[in-house]
Amino acid sequence: MTLPIDEVDEPLRSVKLAEIRGIVAPRVHPIGRYRRRAYEHLEPTTARCHHRSHDAPAIECTCGFHAVRHVDQLPEVTTVVADSVVLDVELSGTVVEHEHGYRAEQQSVLGVRFPAACSWCGAEATRVVAGRIWRSSCARCLTGARRGRAMTRADATARLGVDVVFDRLPTERRRHHVLGSLRAIGMLGLALLPLLLLGRADASKVTAAAMVAVVLCSAVWCAATVLARSIRPHRSFFVAQSGCLFAASLLLMAATP
């Protein structure tokens, strides 16, 4: 259900999921369908539609800055993944109100909430570790390269330019990891099928060896999916397994008269 578009006289305080990426120049990436598009977090930003030439937000489109009223609503509108952060934002300008949140024309980032639990062991976090993805960490897990990239909450605030706090945030749902694991096991089963069929064909030793190698690669990606700490890499692992299945199919076709 969508309510009418309205002009906001006073900014709306809202929250949204995001992730912080980059060691040298940290960027903010929203979690969800458009998470690859980073946006400016130090200055108020105006949304624009990347698919059509209209002003954002528009009723007939999904453009605009998305946010919800409360942190507890975030799992209802997107998939929460490990190492996500929550942005405290102000929405202004033209705003479209939905059943679970808003789409806005303008957005200002006020602060960043990092998970209060360490990303590696789950203990209480006291540091923020910069990296490809910024993570929360406890003092015990600051080993090796992490120690050199770790910073206090105050240092992280100075580095990002907005207030940084540790907070209890929504976590990944177990069922998403289970579904990803079952999908990976199913893909491995499909990769095994051409290997079984190859035994009935008059295939050369080279083709048979290549087929075994492809199936082993699929097994490795399957194990990586099941053992992954987060569902974050599941999509990439699935693409790799799909490539293995495609290669196995080609080898079977080549070996079949």
Image: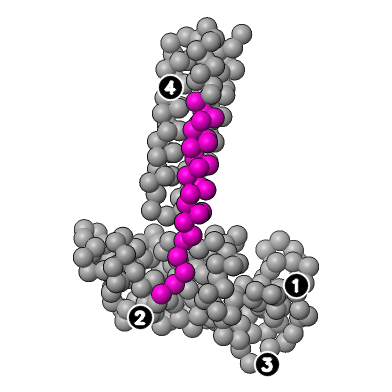
* Image vertical order of residue 167 relative to residue 135, above or below: below
CA gap, disc 3 and disc 1: 23 Å
- Is residue 183 magenta-colored? yes
Q: What residue is shown with label 1?
A: 1
Q: Do callouts 3 and 1 mark residues in contact (Cβ within 8 Å)?
A: no
On the rendered image, what quadrant is the C terminus found in? top right
> Residue 97 magenta-drawn?
no
Q: Position of residue 19 (x, y in %)?
A: 46, 66
Instruction: Determine whether the residue tagged by mark 4 lies in a helix, strand or loop.
Output: helix
Residue 9, numbered circle: 3
- Looking at the image, is mark 1 or mark 4 earlier in the sequence? 1
Observer-side mark, 3 or 2, equals 3
Front disc: 2 or 4: 4
Verify CB contact (< 8 Å) between mark 2 and mark 4. Answer: no
Inspect the image, locate mark 4, and give the three-letter code of the amino acid beneath it. Val
Q: What label does residue 212 carry, if any?
A: 4
Can residue 139 be seen in the rendering of this structure? yes
Q: Nearer the viewer, mark 2 or mark 1?
A: 1
Q: Which residue is mark 2?
A: 158
Distance CA(mark 4)–CA(mark 3): 65 Å
* Whole-percent x, y for residue 72 in the image: 53, 74
Label 4 Cα neighbours within 10 Å, binned few <14 / some 14-19 / many ≥20? some
Does dot 3 land on a helix, a strand or a loop?
strand
